[in-house]
Image: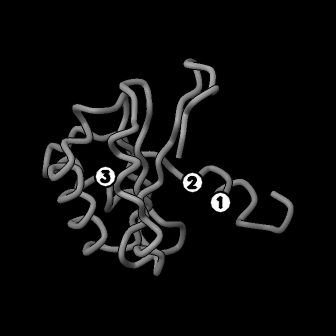
Amino acid sequence: MSLAGVDARVVTVLDLKTPASGELQRNDYSNIARLRTHDQVKFVICDRADYDWARFKLDEYRLHERVADVLFSPSFGQVEGRQLAEWILADNLPVRMQLQLHKLLWHDEPGH
């Protein structure tokens, strides 16, 4: 990922794939070093194991100190938003919870 030629106002959202996504091997952790202070890192949480993994990565890379926002989203149909919120609050994590609005509005219908 090169940001050469990209307007400095552009916000990068780095999506780190969690173990339950089945796409863990797609993560390129070298991109973390390229993040700027106004960027974001997103985790879509499928279960408690994903939450614990994301919490570890948050600490391992000190993500909350690197970027403007670390986002935890409950995976639609897998983890209830309330449950994820309770885990975040119990651990006092420096993250924002974000819902997958496209899934709530269109239920993942084709073309949306």
Q: Please tell me the numbered disc located at residue 85.
A: 3
Q: Amino acid at mark 3?
A: Ala
At horizontal 15% and vertical 49% (from top left) the residue drawn is 59
Question: Furthest-right residue in view?
Answer: 111
Mark 2 element type? loop
Q: Amino acid at mark 1?
A: Lys
Q: Position of residue 12 (x, y in %)?
A: 52, 36
Mark-to-mark CA distance, 3 and 2: 14 Å
Vertical placement of 12 versus 78: above or below? Answer: above
- Look at the image and tell me in which quarter the C terminus lies: bottom right
**Label 1 with label 2: CB-CB less than 8 Å:** yes
Q: Mark 3 or 2 closer to N-term?
A: 3
Few, some or many C-alpha atoms within 10 Å of disc 3 (few <14, some 14-19, many ≥20)? some
Q: Nearer the viewer, mark 3 or mark 2?
A: 2
At horizontal 54% and vertical 30% (from top left) the residue drawn is 11
- Horizontally, is 102 left or right of 97 in the view? right
Q: Please tell me the numbered disc located at residue 103.
A: 1
At horizontal 57% and vertical 18% (from top left) the residue drawn is 9
Mark 3 element type? helix
* Foreground of the two, 78 or 37: 37
At horizontal 62% and vertical 27% (from top left) the residue drawn is 6
Residue 7 picture quarter = top right
Q: Position of residue 53 (x, y in %)?
A: 24, 66
Few, some or many C-alpha atoms within 10 Å of disc 1 (few <14, some 14-19, many ≥20)? some
Vertical placement of 68 versus 30: above or below? Answer: above
Residue 82 picture quarter = bottom left
Q: Mark 3 or 1 closer to N-term?
A: 3
Mark-to-mark CA distance, 3 and 1: 18 Å
Few, some or many C-alpha atoms within 10 Å of disc 2 (few <14, some 14-19, many ≥20)? some
Q: Amino acid at mark 2?
A: Gln
Q: Please tell me the numbered disc located at residue 100.
A: 2
Residue 64 picture quarter = top left
